[in-house]
Image (spheres, rainbow, N blue to C red):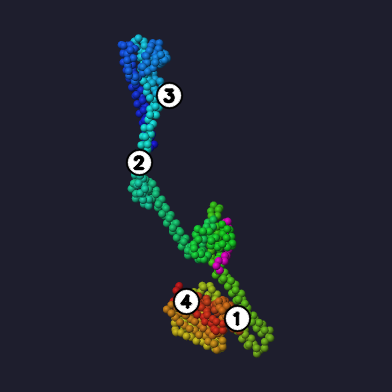
Amino acid sequence: MFVCALVLAVGLAAVMGILYSNFDGQMRKELSKEAAYLAYGVEQQGLNYLKNIKDKSARITYIDQDGTVLFDNEADVSEMKNHSDRTEFQKAEKYGAGESSRYSDTLSEKTIYYALRLKDGTVLRVSGTQDSVLALVENLIFPLCGLLCLMLILSGIMASAISKRIVKPINELDLESPEENRIYEELSPLLSKIHRQNREIQNQLELAKQQQEEFALITENMQEGLIVIDKYTMILSANSSAWNLFHMDRVCQGESVYCLDREEEFRHAIEQVLSGEHTELVLKLNGSDIQLIANPVIRDKKTEGAVVLLVNVTEKLERESLRREFSANVSHELKTPLTSISGFAEIMQGGLVKCEDIPQFAGRIYKESQRLLQLVEDVIQISQLDEEKTSYTWEPVDVYQVCKNAFESLKEKAKRLNVHLYICGEYMKMEAVRTLLEEAVYNICDNAIKYNRNDGSVSVFLTQTAQEIQIVVKDTGVGIPKEDQDRVFERFYRVDKSHSKEIWGTGLGLSIVKHAVGALKGSVILRSEEGNGTEICMKFPKVHKE
């Protein structure tokens, strides 16, 4: 449209200038010819010749030598001024012929005058009017507006058609494979650049995806909970362990971290880490001890967020508590026999014991030393089971023979306490660590004999399925009160501490059983009723799996 309008304006100006100049020259020639014809007639016929002319397409004025108007075909000569000051008149008087032109701003017209001196000295003047350029332009306004509208419509149609034709191949470009497009040669550098950028973007996306998958694989396989938050406490990322620690069924990603725990302690920790400080504390969540370790993420000396690590330290704290309790109990249990041994030895050293009583005192010392030795062996064994560093040898073990051997070892004790021993079952084998299985069976049978009653019994029942072996030890002893049944597997725990001296033991038997059964990938269940005996059931897989 702009180009069309510019061409139109320039062309119109040029054409009008040329035509106007040609029309001006043509009019001057016509006026000069017309004046020559009229001069010939006036010289032949006089003033009457002019009066007889009816055509008024040109204005004819006849002027005397002094400038007085003698005739004018368009005006009353009596009212006309003297023309001696007119340029064309003066030129005609001087040169025989003269011309001039004058403009009328009001009418936007140009009048051309041509004067010719006759033989008698009078002057004949012929004039004609011509529209000015401005008047011509004004006359052309409406046609030009119509032409411009037509140009606008045609330009719009053509521009739309041409642009669609040009843009169509570009819109159909396959930007996934830019170098396979065959269109304008001018687009080749652009398509090559897009191809390079596509490769770079693809490589970056693959690298980012790989890193994301590696990060997700690492975090999802972490037992520790990991939460990443921004400076507005919004959760950006978290692994499944974090949701499990907070017992959340719904993923809160994109929400505030306070939706996990609204306790003051947790809120204070988040506020502290977002202020730029490292934070550590232990939270109580759903009965578990969760250690929270939070570090701020700092960029350009501003805290942009934080990384929160959650570790379940319940078992660790329980173990520490058990170790402290274990140490205290071991000290107490060791102190008792050592005190007895020291006391008896001191009496004997002082010569306060009669000769006939020395064997009795020596027997007491031997008994207490055996008790001390048994305690040390039990402590060493349970410590090894705790550490889980002992390399065990798994082998096929005859379960019936293990139970039989345990009874053989305890036969004297059972006879002394008048307890009868029975084994019900068949020969069966399982993959196990022989020493651990023997310790578990021996300790359970030992307890069943010690806490039995006179003329009581201890029965071992052996059963098996395709995948499992079950060992049940049932006694007719005093039983265990219901409130104590959950604690009998604790170290040094005694149901009736008032009888602990009467029934000698270290208090570690059932604790060793629990650890041994756990090491053999089995389970132990206790059923007891006070006054009606106790039943302990151990279940083991037949085949060991790493």
Label 1 secondary element = loop
The reply to whether the C-beta atoms of the residues labelled 4 and 1 are less than 8 Å apart is no
Mark 4 to mark 1 CA distance (whole Å): 38 Å
**In the rendered image, which residue does mark 4 sit on?**
393
Residue 496: assigned label:
1
Q: Earlier in the sequence, mark 4 or mark 2?
A: 2
Amino acid on which disc 4 is placed: Thr
Mark 3 to mark 2 CA distance (whole Å): 43 Å
The reply to whether the C-beta atoms of the residues labelled 4 and 3 are less than 8 Å apart is no
Is 372 displayed left or right of 236 in the figure? right
Q: Earlier in the sequence, mark 3 or mark 2?
A: 3
The residue shown at (65%, 90%) is 356
Residue 157: assigned label:
2
Q: Nearer the viewer, residue 129 or 517?
A: 129
Label 4 secondary element = loop
The residue shown at (39%, 48%) is 193
Amino acid on which disc 2 is placed: Ile
The residue shown at (56%, 82%) is 530
Q: Residues within 10 Å of mark 1 (few under 14, many from 20)?
A: few
